[in-house]
Image: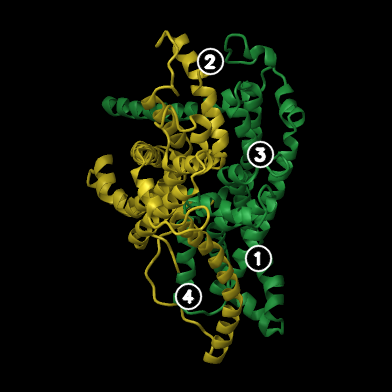
Chain colours: A yellow, B green
Amino acid sequence: MSRLVAELPVPTGTKPVGAGRRRRSRQERLAYTILVPALGTVFIIVTIPFVIAVWQSITSDDGTFIGLRNYSRALGNPLFFDALRATGLYALIVLPTEILLGLAFALLVHRAVKRAGLRATLYVLAVLPLVVPPVAVGVVARLIYAPGYGVLNYVLQSVGITHSEIQWLGVSALAMGAVASVDIWQWTPFVYLVLFAGLQTVPKESIEAAQVDGATWWTQFRYIELHYLRPLFLLILFFRMADVLRVFDHVYILTGGGPGTATQLLSLYIYRIEFRFFDGGQAAALAVMVLVSISILYSLVTRALPLERA
Amino acid sequence: MRGRRVAIGVRLMLIVAGLGVAGFLYAFPLYWLIATSLKGKAELYQSITLVPRHPTLQPYYSVIFERGFWVLLKNSVIVCAATVVVTLAVGLVITYPITRLSVPPGLRVGVLNWALSLRFLPPVAVVVPYFAIVRTLQIYNQPIALIGIYSLFNLPFAIWMLKGFLAEIPIELEEAALVDGANRWTSFRRVLLPLAAPGLMAAATIVFTFAWSEFLFALILTATPNSQTFPVGVQGLVTQFEIIWNDMAASGVIAMSVPLVLMVIARKYMVAGLTFGVIREK
């Protein structure tokens, strides 16, 4: 049984290359002949949309230059701030919950489940939610929360906790909770898998030594294991934050952004401006602002990521 | 001694409770989805039952044939398969030189960093310009538009996964072939590709599932069943005026069954793919 571990980069010098100078330069030439056209094409395909977005944002439909008018309209739209607020709230609910639950589960299984077969089974089960299409998860959530057929109300009523139907998708706070619960359902296993793998990298000797010294499970965690998990928390936070900005599918299916604008996350908001209000200029301005802020954020955080880049 | 045994008992109960609650929270929604998909139309208008009274496959028949979703399934398969081919081909072209040829380390790091940054490009930020491009190129409502965009968005995963797989194959094997008089292309095709095949399969499976799940671009860039993918069809069942619950559930089951089955093949590599190689199978 192979096991899953976290592979953190070890700082090393450049790999020694056994080849002579002439051969290396020939290899290098071949590398560039292959790389330049491929990378160039991809680069152009990636860059063109950005240029177009900038162009769309500073011109009107007939191509005349209108300056930053689209930006001031985008920033002047109160719905934009509703969307930012909703996205922030969503992130504040989803990220801590997923990380805490995932961590609790990783620790639980790491400490309590020693049988390799059971661990392997849990691994497979935890991978499964990650590949379920968000649209399908949205369908499941509909079947649970929807008025009329939603099974949650049915269960609550038959157990006797409530006596009337709760409008899970009709009240702002509840709808946000419902939408967030879908994210938590789908992505907590990811956090679990990453942190569980991280726990496997903790040297057994240091744990045993701590136990001999009478360390409780908390001190074990706080002073030994947490140290090994720290880079992974960063990784999780970064990847999940990027994903929160992409969230679209399950919210679109479950609430469509409603009630009102309660669950209208940034991605749904831009979609709505472009394809419901057909306001391409404002949507382009929003897109440029999102791209610029992501780039800044990315360049600030990326160095800290524990990725093996060599 | 007795206190200790009690403590162990309490711990065991906590563990069982933790696993049990989690198991229920994951199993029940899926059960409800499947149960609903097996209900007949008449049963939907009676009071809710946790177990279908007269289980039937009628909803599946209705979704696939009466509503014509088999066309969407076909589109999805075509788009995903083409995406896999394009993504892996481009991925190999980019990862082969940086892993198998001696290039300056700066180039290798640069390419990988650039691929990583693409991973954080939020699709919704490029939806607006892509829509304009697709309309200008007159490929709106055609699978080719989706194939291109899916390949682009899956490329970062492919590059990082392939880099991991290729780097693990000893360079000496290829060098031996070269010494024996094979040229680079032959040694790539006859030595490297067969050795990388399991990794390529895994990457292909994962890219396929990602493309299978994609919804936003499919929603925006397609308009008719000629090119719509399956998730768009599912969405159509959810947002219509009167929801037919059993059909909707059946479409959900179909949408999730494909990636779930594929994961049996690629389960070992999934986490490595999602974390860009930080978490690996050892």
Camera-nearest residue between B11 and A170: A170
Q: CA distance from mark 3 to mark 1?
A: 34 Å
Q: CA distance from mark 4 to mark 3?
A: 40 Å
Residue B84 x %, y %:
65, 55
Q: Are marks 3 and 1 in contact (CB under 8 Å)?
A: no
User: Is residue B193 visible from the viewing direction of this image?
Assistant: yes
In the picture of the structure, the residue carrying the numbered disc 3 is B230
Judged from this view, the residue extending furthest toward the bottom is A22
- Which residue: 66% across, 28% down? B250
- Amino acid bearing label 3: Phe
In the picture of the structure, the residue carrying the numbered disc 2 is A148
In the picture of the structure, the residue carrying the numbered disc 1 is B195
In the picture of the structure, the residue carrying the numbered disc 4 is B107
Label tally:
4
Lateral position of residue B9 relative to residue A115, left or right: left
Q: Are marks 1 and 2 in contact (CB under 8 Å)?
A: no
Q: Chain of mark 3?
A: B
Q: Earlier in the sequence, mark 3 or mark 1?
A: 1
